[in-house]
Amino acid sequence: MKNDIHIKNGIYIPEHELEITTARAGGPGGQHVNKTNTRVIIRWNIHKTNALNGNQKHRVSEKMQSELTTDGDLVIQNGSTRSQLQNKKLAIAQLVKKLCDALHVPKKRKKTGISKNVKEKRLKSKKMRSVLKRTRSRKDFE
């Protein structure tokens, strides 16, 4: 529980469900990148997890369909820094962000109407404008 990853609203991913591996990272860094395994790869199976209930699993698999493997694994890689620890933190933050976005349920839109006072005010101003324009006309009333 101490090292579990907090997602949101009481959802925690147990640490033992994450498969964290390291690899050699490319990019700048000279000989350092050829000697050290700084890239962090996190693998997490959405279908086998106990952290999400059935509805949440369905929502995540629908929203992240293009990012999941055929087995239902979400794979996140990070090798942006020269530090393995920093890359691990960044990869976990990326996992949390993606899950928060996938679990977000948009609010149902409520139809709103025009209030009675607003309608009356609009009609009154139209009536005033009509009277003003009528008084400007050059008709002779005889």
Image (spheres, rainbow, N blue to C red):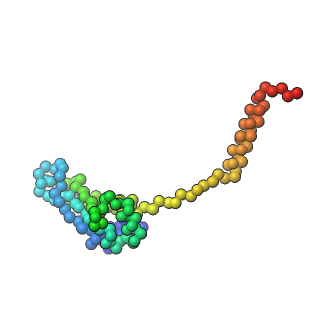
Q: How many marks?
A: 0
Q: What residue do we see at 36% from left, 64% from top?
A: 61
Q: Is residue 81 left or right of residue 97?
A: left
Residue 43, can we see it? yes
Residue 73, can we see it? no
Task: Name the residue nearer the viewer: 34 or 133.
Answer: 133
Q: What residue do we see at 28% from left, 58% from top?
A: 90
Residue 137 image position (x, y, % from top left): 77, 28
Residue 62 image position (x, y, % from top left): 38, 62
* Vertical side of 34 occupied by 15: above or below: below
- Image quadrant occupied by the N terminus: bottom left
Residue 103 image position (x, y, % from top left): 40, 63
* Vertical side of 136 occupied by 39: above or below: below
Task: Name the residue nearer the viewer: 68 or 16.
Answer: 68
Task: Name the residue nearer the viewer: 130 or 11.
Answer: 130
Q: What residue do we see at 25% from left, 58% from top?
A: 77
Q: Quadrant of residue 139?
A: top right
- Image quadrant occupied by the C terminus: top right
Q: Is residue 104 left or right of residue 95?
A: right
* Vertical side of 141 occupied by 85: above or below: below
Residue 134 image position (x, y, % from top left): 77, 32
